[in-house]
Image (tube, rainbow, N blue to C red):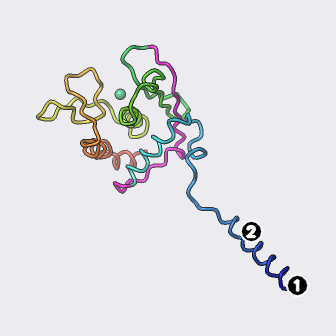
């Protein structure tokens, strides 16, 4: 019996030790404070896409927030605000969000983080086929959106190309 008790104690001790060493990966739901639950997945994707390009992005450390709200202006799907003395904030239009595909939602969130995190301005350049050269297009220019699963990599590469400059200057 003493053996059994000792064995149980050993098992419990190991479990306690195991519990004291949780994985370092912070779950999305607690990782981005001030970001609406549905946006967190896209914030995480932004960080992941940066990481695959060798760029370390930590949106939570900078405190960028994100909300889904009705934006009254027509044709405005998202916006980045720069409140004074507060971290930048992404707003995505609720009506668009309800209807938008996963890829289109990603496009809008990445565009707004392009403003809010990468501090990029709009770029209206066109590719030879008339498609926008960047997801940082304003939507008011003449280039055509062409963000799809086939072109996504090209556009995400372009999005982060200017990142190292901003990392140094921040
Ligand atoms: Zn914009």
* Region of the chain picked out in magenta, as a range: 52-72
- Which residue is the extreme one toward the left? 128
For mark 1, give the secondary structure.
helix
Q: Which residue is mark 1?
A: 2
Instruction: Say which label, 2 or 1, has the lower sequence index.
Output: 1
Which residue corresponds to the image point at 49% horizontal and 19% vertical from the top-left?
70
Which residue corresponds to the image point at 40% horizontal and 54% vertical from the top-left?
51
Which residue corresponds to the image point at 27% horizontal and 20% vertical from the top-left?
140
In the rendered view of the protein, which quadrant contains the N terminus? Answer: bottom right
In the image, 72 versus 116, the foreground residue is: 72
In the image, 168 versus 125, the foreground residue is: 125
In the rendered view of the protein, which quadrant contains the C terminus? Answer: top left
Q: Which residue is mark 2?
A: 16
- Tell me: 107 left or right of 21: left
- Tell me: 133 left or right of 89: left
Residue 19 figure quarter: bottom right
In the image, 168 versus 38, the foreground residue is: 38
For mark 2, give the secondary structure.
helix
């Amino acid at each position: 019996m003493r053996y059994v008790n000792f064995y149980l104690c050993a098992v419990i001790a190991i479990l306690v030790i195991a519990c004291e060493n949780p994985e370092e990966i912070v779950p999305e739901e607690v990782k981005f404070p001030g970001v609406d639950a549905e946006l967190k997945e896209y914030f995480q994707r932004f960080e992941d896409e940066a990481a695959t390009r060798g760029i370390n992005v930590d949106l939570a450390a900078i405190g960028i927030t994100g909300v889904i709200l009705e934006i009254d202006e027509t044709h405005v799907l998202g916006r980045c605000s720069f409140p004074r003395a507060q971290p930048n904030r992404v707003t995505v239009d609720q009506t668009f969000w309800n209807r938008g595909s996963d890829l289109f939602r990603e496009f809008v969130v990445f565009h707004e983080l392009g403003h809010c995190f990468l501090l990029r301005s709009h770029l209206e350049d066109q590719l030879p086929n008339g498609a926008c050269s960047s997801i940082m297009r304003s939507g008011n220019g003449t280039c055509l959106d062409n963000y799809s699963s086939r072109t996504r990599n090209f556009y995400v590469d372009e999005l982060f190309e200017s990142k190292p400059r901003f990392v140094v200057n921040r």
